[in-house]
Amino acid sequence: MTDAGEVRRHEALASLAILDTPREERFERLVRLTQKMFDVPMAMVSLIDDDRQWNKAVVGLGDDVEFPRSESMCAHVAQDDAVMVVTDPENDARFRDFASVKGELGVRFYAGQPLHAPGGVAVGSLCIVDTEHRMISERQLDVLRELADFVETELARGDELDRAGELQRNLLPRTVPHLPGYDVAGICLPASAVGGDFFDWHSVGDDFQVVLADVMGKGVPAALIGAGVRSLMRGASRFNDLETAVNRAAYAIESDLTETSTFVTLFAARLDPVTHVMTYVDAGHGIAGIVTASGEARQFESDGLPLGAPAWEPWRADHVVLEPGDTFIALSDGMLDLFDTIEEAREAARATVAACSTVQEIVDIVAEYSRIHHATDDVTCVVIRRDQA
Amino acid sequence: MQIDVTEPRTGASVLTLEGRLNMVSAPQLKTAITEAVEAGRTHVVVDLADVGFMDSSGLGVLIAGLKRTRQDGGDLRITGVTQQVATVLQLTNLDRVLHSYSDVGEALDGW
């Protein structure tokens, strides 16, 4: 490949802005499907950077997402912009010295279809890899091509969606508030590039306010409504107590929710760090409560309806006092899909909180759990722990 | 998802669903409810007995359907609620407004 070709690929990758981005279910799903269809131990979506192969999605290779370009078969697919089948790498001068071939992994088969950026430049490969010798038919290569077309569609779609997703991430709190006597952590993992879940926290006078919400549905429509709810809650919270703020925000968004036939579950809490009184409103959000220092759970009970429900009932605030060592945790229902019953999900949350020494550890475990179990819904979690006296 | 529509009596529709009620299939149900209401059948029973899984998009369409039927003086009721569907309803407290009946006959009763 000419230097000009290298420059074109470098530019195409830069405009995709995909290198070193987090794993995304929309690519993982295609790689899992590819791996299963061809019954191979390994499959990946690779992208060829100047000096390395970086994998956007991979199965069967552990968590390693990159290796040197000098060890990359996919680099040949991208350079030549052509399908490549390798059936005897041990006797192929190009590959026989690769660590993956002569080493422990023992690669014996490779087939890759080039992946193109929206401008048509080959930037990587969708490939299948086996440690056993095998053959592949023309027909199967056509199937791999069709799967590669799907990946390319996602690469193109991602361009615009990623910018929306980035904007949405910027709407999430980026700093941990200074809250004397407390530790706070939160996480929001959309199932696709953008999602209907969000959380927000900020100070209201001397109090600390946190809001979690889950807009029915997924993707861009849910994200648009979510951004509206967030702004309304911020605006209404400035000069009102929490109960009034929730009711005003709910009233303001009601007609939008009816128009778009959607509803929003929401949990809002305001904490006075001096008296340790937490005031909260639960609008059908469901999984929120306190885990005490001794590991006992107290689930918040509420019969509040979601915003946009087909009956208008004012929302009422409740109060709870956070004792030393108490941990407040709220989870979105995306987590619920990963358990058989609400009770199991709550017990898992209780056990996790009881076992962790820091709040960051708790949200990290929630994030890891939803990744491992391929959560298909957005997952959000906020944790507030009062210091031990 | 399969939707089977019957009209057991004037002004009432029974929608029998089979499959997964999620983001992909929810618009189908929305269309079926809208068609029923526009044809004057404002009392709608949705039979969920053969719905193996329902996500929040499915629930959204049921709630929107409830609003729509009530606007026109009707109602929407559900039957055949599985454990998974009951869990979603219970968690959001929407079981308080979207009423569930043990079978289609009972749901149609009193309309």
Image (cartoon, helix red, strand yellow):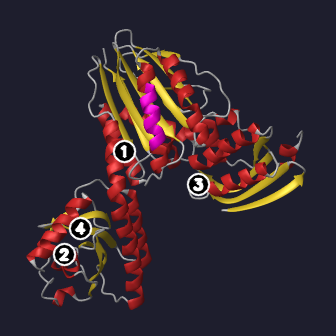
Instruction: Check disc 3 and give the amino acid type.
Output: Asn
Position above or below: A105 against A303: below
Mark 1 Cα shell of 10 Å, populated few (<14), some (14-19), many (≥20) = some
Disc 1 from disc 4: Cα separation: 26 Å
- Badges 3 and 4: C-beta atoms under 8 Å apart? no
Snapshot quadrant of residue A130: bottom left
Q: Residue A157's spot in the image, x, y percent?
A: 37, 61
Specify whether disc 1 shares its chain with disc 2: yes
Q: Which mark is residue A367?
A: 1
Residue occupying image coordinates x 31% and y 69% = A44
Write down the residue under mark 3.
B22
Disc 1 from disc 2: Cα separation: 32 Å
Membership of A225 in magenta stretch: yes
Specify whether disc 1 shares its chain with disc 4: yes
Name the residue nearer the viewer: A155 or A39. A155
Specify whether disc 3 shares its chain with disc 4: no
Q: Residue A223's spot in the image, x, y percent?
A: 44, 44
Snapshot quadrant of residue A109: bottom left
Magenta-drawn segment: A224-233
Chain assignment, label 3 = B
Residue occupying image coordinates x 82% and y 49% = B41
Mark 3 Cα shell of 10 Å, populated few (<14), some (14-19), many (≥20) = some
Give the label, 1 or 2, closer to the camera: 2
Write down the residue under mark 2.
A75
Mark 2 Cα shell of 10 Å, populated few (<14), some (14-19), many (≥20) = many
Instruction: Check disc 1 and give the amino acid type.
Output: Ala
Q: Indicate which disc, 2 or 4, sits on the residue closer to the N terminus.
A: 4
- Magenta span main SS: helix
